[in-house]
Image (spheres, rainbow, N blue to C red):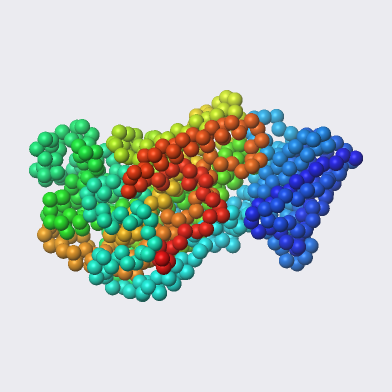
């Protein structure tokens, strides 16, 4: 008789009560143990100990088979963190689950050692991998919700998700119903008012909970230096490009900008020296504007010219609110009347808000991340090292995205209630954005270089992001080279090739013009793609969502919609014109709810550099520890840089990205009483 010591660890989540019975059998290269009952009650966050007997020596252990069987009519979900088995000789083998068991089922969990098909795998493990993928492809099914956009999981409500996705590890703010926040707003008599704001100062009264940065924005929003700063370090820092030649449809000349430059330089000189930049919102042209509270809204496709001045500040020097130049589409300048120039900048900020929500937030943070998640679940088994490396960054992704689609971009959702494009326009804009999507654009170094933003100073998104990107790439290089000894093993990994092909077909829609490969030919290509996946699902998410409340809680700095058409002449704008153009009270309040929800979306599911215990049992801890130490050093550098600044840029501090406490309570709503 051979006795195996078994430890079963549950997570802190709700686990099975006295309504189900759990059984286990242990499978090794020389046989399988009898089915052994583990009982029908498990406390959350505990380790339970058992003795499992076998008539034969099972040899090296391959997997454990867990059975969840009915003992009463009611079924409870059970979260199994991991199983650890010690053989009669004392050899310990880990079997990481980190899975919900829902319904009455049998699930095989392979040992923790990462393996690829290039290795001489035991036929039992090969069979387990094939069965696992077959089962996952049956429950993780694709659907195209928006024509011309990346595909999503076939689920419109939480109950349609695979059962393992219905029980979150970390509750999303979207699950703390928007309605509860709106009740607070109703008490403050904001969501019932469709009146315009009577005064800019009244907008401040809407927010009772402020962040250090959001306190500063109402003081700085009209400053040209702050306007330019947001192109570099706001929540949408990827729109601006270096301008080497003034666009033909933006007829800015030296005479117009002479007051900005002074006598020491001129437009041509600054263009040649690489100090002129442009933000072009042409992609918004012809997007049908939304109707909010039964009133048609307005949308423009502006062009904005910016200059890096000798003090290294980026400042706007010319704004045209439409793409077609002409007498009814004047070019606004900093030396125009104060309210003319302010309103022109507000229109640009409104355009930037549309692009932020649709391109950076909806496409990158949700749709592309969902494609990475789906392809990983459908094409890579639990034992695959790429699966192990990516899954911590994909936790709860599908659940949150279903909630976001239903509450943000669906008809009647927050986009319809707040944004100039609305849900219909957002879908059209998304398709236009997809036409510009390239493989290069998802890689930070390539995107920075393509936009000519390599050397502009005070671009903290680039500086901090590149440090994290490089550290992540170095870490992944070590891990990939550990498992893949040469490029031929990458080419010959059928599971890996199916994974990248699914990203190509479902995310980039099989378009060769995007430059996204359908196959991987070498290790560097795998490292590059994995770096992008992790970066988008952790770092890029922190950039886009982290600052939305900081920069958008003061509504005039990020108006979600506009209620009057853009001005067709100079000299006619007053403060009242601006108040009549900005979103009315109800829309402002609902938009504030949206940016608060997005900014406080928990990032603990995107654990940069942290891997659950037992996921890797190979000699990889040194690589992981070095990665964590590198991230800690980056964090230290960022904290040192920011310690004396009022307006801080901490969105890419790796410490909160990596170490958000899953038990930390949700932040209070900005609408809560002090």
Seen from this angle, which residue lies furthest front? 644
Q: Is residue 317 left or right of residue 149?
A: left
Residue 422 location, quadrant: bottom left
Up-down relation of residue 81 to residue 288 (above or below)? above
**Could you tell me if residue 90 is visible in this image?**
yes
- Depth check: give the residue in front, 25 or 486: 25
Up-down relation of residue 24 to residue 290 (above or below)? above
Q: Residue at x 12, y 56 (%)?
A: 337
How many marks overall?
0
Q: Is residue 182 left or right of residue 291?
A: right
**Could you tell me if residue 130 is visible in this image?**
no
Where residue 299 appears, x then y in whole percent?
27, 59
- Depth check: give the residue in front, 660 or 483: 660
Question: In what quadrant of the picture does the C terminus appear?
Answer: bottom left
Residue 673 location, quadrant: bottom left
Where residue 217 appears, x then y in whole percent?
30, 55
């Amino acid at each position: 008789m051979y006795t195996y010591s078994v430890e079963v660890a549950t997570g802190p989540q709700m686990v099975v009560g006295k309504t189900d019975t759990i059984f286990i059998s242990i499978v090794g290269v020389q046989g399988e143990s009898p089915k052994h009952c583990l009982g029908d009650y498990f406390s959350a966050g505990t380790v339970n100990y058992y003795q499992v007997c076998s008539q034969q020596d099972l040899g090296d252990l391959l997997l454990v088979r867990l059975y969840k069987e009915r003992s009463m009519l009611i079924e409870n979900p059970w979260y199994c963190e991991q199983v650890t088995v010690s053989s009669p000789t004392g050899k310990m083998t880990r079997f990481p689950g980190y899975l919900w068991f829902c319904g009455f089922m049998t699930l095989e969990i392979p040992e923790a050692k990462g393996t690829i098909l290039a290795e001489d795998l035991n036929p039992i493990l090969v069979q387990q991998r094939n069965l696992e993928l077959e089962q996952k492809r049956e429950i993780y099914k694709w659907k195209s919700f928006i024509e011309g956009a990346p595909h999503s999981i076939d689920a419109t409500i939480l109950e349609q998700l695979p059962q393992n996705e219905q029980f979150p590890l970390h509750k999303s703010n979207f699950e703390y119903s928007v309605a509860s926040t709106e009740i607070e707003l109703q008490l403050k008599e904001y969501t019932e008012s469709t009146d315009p704001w009577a005064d800019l100062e009244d907008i401040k009264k809407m927010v009772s909970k402020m962040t250090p940065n959001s306190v500063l924005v109402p003081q700085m929003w009209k400053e040209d230096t702050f306007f330019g700063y947001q192109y570099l370090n706001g929540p949408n820092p990827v729109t601006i490009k270096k301008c080497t030649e003034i666009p033909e449809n933006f007829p800015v000349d030296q005479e117009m900008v002479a007051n900005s430059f002074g006598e020491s330089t001129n437009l041509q000189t600054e263009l040649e020296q690489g100090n002129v930049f442009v933000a072009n919102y042409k992609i918004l042209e012809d997007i049908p504007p939304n109707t909010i509270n039964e009133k048609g809204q307005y949308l423009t496709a502006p062009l904005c010219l910016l200059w890096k001045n000798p003090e290294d500040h980026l400042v706007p020097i010319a704004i045209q609110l439409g793409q077609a130049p002409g007498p009814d589409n004047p070019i606004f300048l900093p030396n125009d009347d104060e309210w003319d120039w302010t309103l022109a900048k507000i229109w640009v900020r409104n355009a930037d808000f549309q692009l932020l929500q649709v391109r950076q937030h909806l496409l990158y943070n949700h749709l592309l991340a969902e494609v990475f998640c789906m392809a990983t679940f459908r094409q890579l088994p639990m034992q695959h090292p790429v699966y192990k490396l990516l899954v911590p960054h994909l936790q709860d992704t599908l659940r949150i995205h279903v909630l976001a689609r239903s509450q943000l971009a669906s008809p009647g959702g927050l986009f319809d209630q707040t944004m100039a494009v609305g849900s219909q326009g957002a879908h059209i804009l998304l398709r236009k954005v997809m036409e510009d999507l390239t493989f290069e654009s998802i890689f930070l170094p390539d995107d920075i270089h393509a936009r000519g933003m390599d050397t502009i100073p005070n671009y903290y998104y680039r500086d901090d992001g590149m440090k994290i990107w490089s550290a992540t790439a170095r870490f992944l290089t070590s891990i990939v080279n550990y498992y893949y000894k040469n490029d031929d093993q990458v080419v010959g990994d059928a599971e890996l090739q199916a994974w990248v092909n699914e990203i190509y077909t479902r995310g980039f829609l099989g378009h060769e013009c995007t430059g996204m490969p359908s196959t991987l030919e070498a290790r560097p290509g795998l490292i590059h793609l994995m770096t992008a996946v992790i970066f988008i699902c952790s770092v890029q998410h922190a950039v886009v969502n982290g600052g939305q409340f900081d920069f958008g809680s003061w509504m005039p700095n990020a108006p979600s919609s506009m209620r009057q058409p853009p001005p067709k002449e100079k000299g006619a704008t007053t403060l009242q014109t601006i108040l009549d153009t900005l979103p009315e009270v109800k829309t402002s309040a609902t938009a504030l709810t949206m940016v608060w929800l997005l900014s406080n979306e928990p990032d603990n599911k995107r654990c940069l550099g942290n891997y659950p215990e037992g996921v890797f049992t190979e000699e990889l801890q040194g690589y992981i520890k070095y990665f964590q130490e590198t991230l800690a050093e980056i964090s230290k550098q960022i904290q040192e840089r920011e310690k004396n600044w009022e307006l801080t840029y901490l969105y890419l501090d790796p410490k909160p990205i990596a170490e958000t406490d899953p038990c930390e309570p949700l932040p209070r709503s900005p609408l809560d009483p002090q």
